[in-house]
């Protein structure tokens, strides 16, 4: 593709990304600083259409980029702009780690991305195993109990467990005292390993029923998976113009709630350096949804990349994203989160 055709393709796609409407040769002739006539521009657009980079919707004489055209644009022609000082400050302020927990940092990073990009922002991170301050079993009736865990930052989490039949009230007290004595200052993984070893060796004063309560209570915290924090879903509905569009977005919302999708998103960020862009049907997750995703891995240690990531961060929006602005937003936010959690 010669430079003249590239220039026309870039201007056409820039205009489309701004308006969402088909772009005609007369519009381009007014926008491009060149002596090319509308007829010449039409000929070049026809060549680009023949190459599979543009197509003409039946309702308009203008052209729209195909998925292949958008891919060529982001890989070859995209002009990535620098974030303003205000944008950088907004992200840093939202993610400020001062007296805040890691979950709060991740949640605020997601909100900042969603607000600045006008898209759905997401953060994908491992479930953090905090240092435990207190664990307690509270009976709630119907053969169930609430397992209350307080971490070192006074964050409280609850899980509901099913109790063994015929459990005496004293067993819950015994289980609480046993866990409290052995969990203080340890994270959940350390507590599980320590108590499992004690139970296996029979070196505990717990009776059989209380031991089952302890085992069930610890198993309720299955922290081997990643969590997905998604904010700004309403932004995905802004471009909905038909019932079919709404159904596609609703389908995407459903997929994003599945643990399998979370794991696949993490795989997409693994093994790649920098920001990745998935346009429409390039990935089966977005096939038929009219959406794209910009995603970056969050390094597990500041300054490292590649496979050494602890999660991912990004945005989901329509295929006509402002990629030149979104890419640096995602890249910068990933770096800020990595620094604060590193």
Image: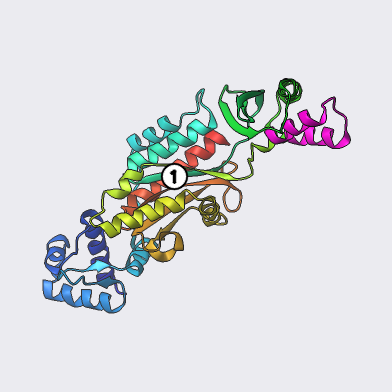
Quarter of the picture containing the N terminus is bottom left
Residue at position x 11%, y 67% from top? 26
Residue named by callout 1: 122
Residues rendered magenta in the picture: 192-217
Compare residues 116 and 1 and report the one nearer the observer. Answer: 116
Image x and y of residue 341, in percent: 56, 35
Image x and y of residue 264, in percent: 53, 56
Q: Is residue 215 magenta?
A: yes
Is residue 161 placed above or below 275 in the rendered structure?
above
Asked which secondary structure carries label 1, the reply is strand
State the predominant SS element of the stretch in magenta: helix
Q: Is residue 79 visible?
A: no
Instruction: Name the side, left or right, on which 36 lies relative to 241.
Output: left
Is residue 325 placed above or below 221 in the rendered structure?
below
Image x and y of residue 340, in percent: 53, 34
Which corner quadrant of the image does residue 92 belong to? top left
Q: Is residue 42 visible?
A: yes
């Amino acid at each position: 593709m010669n430079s003249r055709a590239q220039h026309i393709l870039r201007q056409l796609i820039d205009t489309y990304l701004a308006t969402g409407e088909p772009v005609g040769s007369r519009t381009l002739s007014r926008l491009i600083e060149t002596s090319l006539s509308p007829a010449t521009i039409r000929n070049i657009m026809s060549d680009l259409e023949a190459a599979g980079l543009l197509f003409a919707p039946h309702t308009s004489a203008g052209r729209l980029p195909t998925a292949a055209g958008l891919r060529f644009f982001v890989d070859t022609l995209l002009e990535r702009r620098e974030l303003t000082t205000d944008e950088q400050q907004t992200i840093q302020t939202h993610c400020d780690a001062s007296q805040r927990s890691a979950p709060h940092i991740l949640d605020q990073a997601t909100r900042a991305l969603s607000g600045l990009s006008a898209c759905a922002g997401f953060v994908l991170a491992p479930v953090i195993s905090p240092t435990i301050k207190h664990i307690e079993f509270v009976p709630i009736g119907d053969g169930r109990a609430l397992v209350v865990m307080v971490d070192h930052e006074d964050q409280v989490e609850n899980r509901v467990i099913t109790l063994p039949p015929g459990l005496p009230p004293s067993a819950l007290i015994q289980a609480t005292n046993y866990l409290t004595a052995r969990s203080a200052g340890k994270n959940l993984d350390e507590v599980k390993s320590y108590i499992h070893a004690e139970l296996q060796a029979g070196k505990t004063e717990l009776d059989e029923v209380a031991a089952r309560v302890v085992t069930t209570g610890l198993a309720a915290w299955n922290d081997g998976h990643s969590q997905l924090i998604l904010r700004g879903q309403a932004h995905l509905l802004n471009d909905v113009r038909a019932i079919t569009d709404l159904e596609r977005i609703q389908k995407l919302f459903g997929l994003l709630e599945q643990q399998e999708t979370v794991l696949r998103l993490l795989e997409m960020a693994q093994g790649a350096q920098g920001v990745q862009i998935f346009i429409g049907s390039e990935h089966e997750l977005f096939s038929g949804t009219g959406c794209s995703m910009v995603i970056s891995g969050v390094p597990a240690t500041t300054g490292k990349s590649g496979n050494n990531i602890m999660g991912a961060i990004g945005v989901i929006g329509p295929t006509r994203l402002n990629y030149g602005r979104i890419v640096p937003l995602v890249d910068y936010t990933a770096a800020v989160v990595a620094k604060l959690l590193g």
